[in-house]
Image (tube, grey):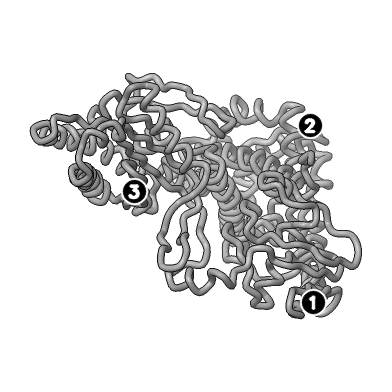
Amino acid sequence: MVVREDFSTIIRKIRIFSGAILFAYVIMHLLNHSINVFSIDLADAVRSSYFHPVWQNPVGLVLLYGSFVAHMILGFSSILTRKSFKMKARDWIQIIFPVLALLFLLQHIAVSFIITKIYGGEETYSLFFAAMNTETSSDLIVGAILFSLMTIFIWVHGVIGIDSYLKQQAVHHNKFTFYMRYPSLFRFIYWIVPVGAVLGWLSGLRNMSFIAQIQSFEMNMPIPNYLGSIIFKFIPQEAFPVIMQVEPLVMKYYPLVVLFVILVCIFNVVRARFFGRIIVSYPGGETVSIPKGTSVLEASRKGKIPHQSVCGGRGRCTTCRVKVTANDGTLTAPSAHEIKAIERVGLDDNVRLACQLRPTNNISVQPLLNPENTLETVRSARALTGKEQETVVLFVDLRDFTKLSEKKLPYDVVYILNKYYAVCGEIIEKNGGRLDKFIGDGIMAIFDASSDSNVNSKNALVSANAISKSMKTLNSEMKTDFSEDMRFGMGIHAGSMIVGMMGYGKTVTETAVGDNVNIAARLEELTKTYKCELVVSKYVADKANIDTKKMKPKTVDIRGRKELLEVFTFEKAADVPV
């Protein structure tokens, strides 16, 4: 099956791309505003020297206006197609803030376009501040408040989108990992940019008021005349009649557009709840009535029908898969996410993922993973399903232990292994890790005690360093008693993994599974190739913030992984600069 991007995936990419363009524009625009704290002339100089060359060329203009139109259309489309008002607080903010901001933003964009693109005028901070200072005191205060609110609304909307995207890419795809490594830096940026912009704008208004008073006194003219001279300097006279029509038109028609959107939303929610419903049938005669376009997994949850879904319905696993036994019509085509999941495990054509299948006709399905077999067992162990999270894994394995054990009595082997387990286990637990399992002479440890993966990465490397030193001491003791040295190798990697309660019957434990667990195991195996004690991914080293300036990473090919991986090797793990 060839994976073709479905329409929803293309729309999502357009929304992300247009949002990124607009966020880049906004952050540059607000930083330019903040320079007014120092002087209006400096802000205008930066605007003409740096801001305009980026955005006022043909490519920049097409990207900017195209992104704005696309993002606005897609935003309103997503609102119009909602079938429920049940949303998280941040989703409500994502919708309400830009809708409110557009009431004033549309006026700003329209006036700017008319002045510069239609009548060939010039847009400067001196112009804006002069125009605002011509207002009455009460209108000036209202204008300053509205500007501050518009800035906050637009900025918060953009930050929520960028934050969600970067976190998702870092956790699930190991991209933009710097975002997770330096959260304090980005929180600082998220606060300082809008605060600086508002302070700059208010400073510009105040400075223009002072300048107008001084210049009008020196030139012996009324303040309104001086401010008017600045306005007429940058705006052609013939542009004024058109500009004056912008505010009345926006204030008259934009609220009507918003009202129309609200009414359509209410209509869609009511229609989804009471009309256009379909029936999803399950084995045993159970049925659930749902609106068209609702996923089968959502139908199961609504009908309180047990249905497995480890990834939470995001199309990253196949535990929710169902067999379609009957369908009154044509099934919706699988999405790109669903196709990837289906191809990975090789499912039949009549098997679909319940979280991705959104039927538009009556349908009969049979969940293929029976939750009744394990439901009570797993509930008693605190968790029915796993969760996807950033986790650090450490593998430790003894070298040539089979040969060593052949020369020893069984009780001696048990004694040696327990000493080795005790040394490693004590260090791992002391540094915030937990022993996941013992595999012969190997140990798997998970570091997820902290919500900060940087801390977990650091703890794993500190553990490796301490294990190396303690094993040296243990070898000195063992050499006296058994005339043998224990050699070992360790591998450390981090990334998105499924963490949850797994097992059967009474043997249910919390563990981690996923590609990144396998990568950590492969890194431990590479210690044999490089004849070293530790191989750690560069990703973990960067997150732990250890000094790697004098080290050159190696690029390795990990079995089962398409992309190459950068790693650091340490002949002695005790040399890790922690």
Q: CA distance from mark 1 to mark 3?
A: 56 Å
Residue drawn at the location 46% of the way across and 48% of the way down: 390
The residue that disc 1 covers is 270
Disc on the earlier residue, 1 or 3: 1
In the displayed structure, would residue 359 be above or below residue 124? below
**Closer to the camera in the image, 18 or 151:** 18
Q: Secondary structure at mark 2?
A: loop
The residue that disc 2 covers is 120
In the displayed structure, would residue 416 be above or below residue 101? above
Residue drawn at the location 59% of the way across and 69% of the way down: 371
Neighbor class of circle 2 (other Cα within 10 Å; few <14, some 14-19, many 20+) is: some
Q: Amino acid at mark 2?
A: Gly
Q: Amino acid at mark 3?
A: Phe
Give the image location of residue 104, x and y in percent. Answer: 69, 55
Residue drawn at the location 76% of the way across and 78% of the way down: 287
Residue drawn at the location 10% of the way across and 36% of the way down: 481
| The label number, if any, that marks residue 475 in the structure image | none
Q: CA distance from mark 2 to mark 1?
A: 49 Å
Which corner quadrant holds the N terminus? Answer: top right
Q: Amino acid at mark 1?
A: Val
Residue 538 placement, left or right of 464: right
Q: Residue furthest left?
A: 480
Which quarter of the picture shows residue 64? Answer: top right
The residue that disc 3 covers is 438
The reply to whether residue 214 is in sight is: no
Q: Secondary structure at mark 3?
A: strand
Disc on the earlier residue, 3 or 2: 2
**Closer to the camera in the image, 56 or 91:** 91
